[in-house]
Image: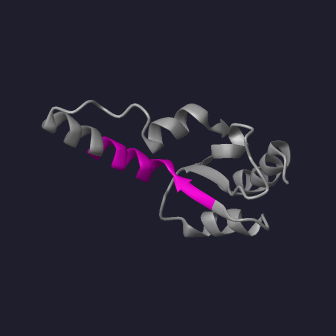
C-alpha cells in the first residue's frame, strides 16, 4: 500500500510541470484510512479542460486514481445550494466539494 508521502512525492512532479494548478490528496489517503482496496483521490484546482494533467496523474500510479476538478465540484455545489435555498431546504454542509475542501492535503 502506498504512503501519503509517496503519493505527494509523485504528484509533486506533475505540480512542478504545470503552471497555474494546485494539487491535493483527498479521501481515504488524506484521512489515513486507506486500505489495500482504496483508490487515490487527487484534487486539482486549475483549468478543468486540461485532460493531459489528469492523464499524467493517472500514469503515476498502478492503482485506480480519481481526478477531481475543484471548479467542476464547486459549480455543482453552488447549483445544489441555490436549488436547496429555492426549495426551502437546508444547505448541505457535507457536500463532496465542501468535504474535499476541508479534508484535502495540498502540495
Q: Is residue 107 visible?
A: no
- State the residue in front, 23 or 16: 23
Horizontal side of residue 62 vs 65, given as left or right = right
Identify the residue at horizontal 35%, vertical 34% (top origin). 92
For the record, the magenta segment spans: 66-79
Horizontal side of residue 98 vs 62, given as left or right = left
Residue 7 x/y as whole percent: 79, 50
Magenta-span inclusion, residue 93: no
Q: Quadrant of residue 26?
A: top right
Residue 49 x/y as whole percent: 48, 64
Residue 41 x/y as whole percent: 63, 52
User: Can you say which quadrant of the picture contains the N terminus?
Assistant: bottom right
Total residue callouts: 0
Q: Quadrant of residue 78?
A: top left
Identify the residue at horizontal 81%, vertical 54% (top origin). 10
- State the residue in front, 98 or 33: 33
Residue 103 x/y as whole percent: 60, 34
- State the residue in front, 50 or 29: 29
Identify the residue at horizontal 84%, vertical 43% (top origin). 5
Amino acid at each position: 500500500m502506498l504512503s501519503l508521502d509517496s503519493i505527494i512525492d509523485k504528484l509533486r512532479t506533475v505540480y512542478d510541470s504545470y503552471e497555474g494548478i494546485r494539487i491535493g490528496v483527498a479521501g481515504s489517503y488524506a484521512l489515513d484510512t486507506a486500505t489495500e482496496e482504496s483508490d487515490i483521490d487527487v484534487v486539482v484546482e486549475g483549468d478543468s479542460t486540461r485532460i493531459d494533467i489528469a492523464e499524467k496523474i493517472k500514469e503515476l500510479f498502478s492503482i485506480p486514481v480519481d481526478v477531481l476538478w475543484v471548479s467542476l465540484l464547486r459549480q455543482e455545489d453552488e447549483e445544489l445550494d441555490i436549488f436547496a435555498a429555492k426549495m426551502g431546504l437546508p444547505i448541505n454542509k457535507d457536500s463532496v466539494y465542501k468535504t474535499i475542501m476541508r479534508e484535502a492535503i495540498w502540495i
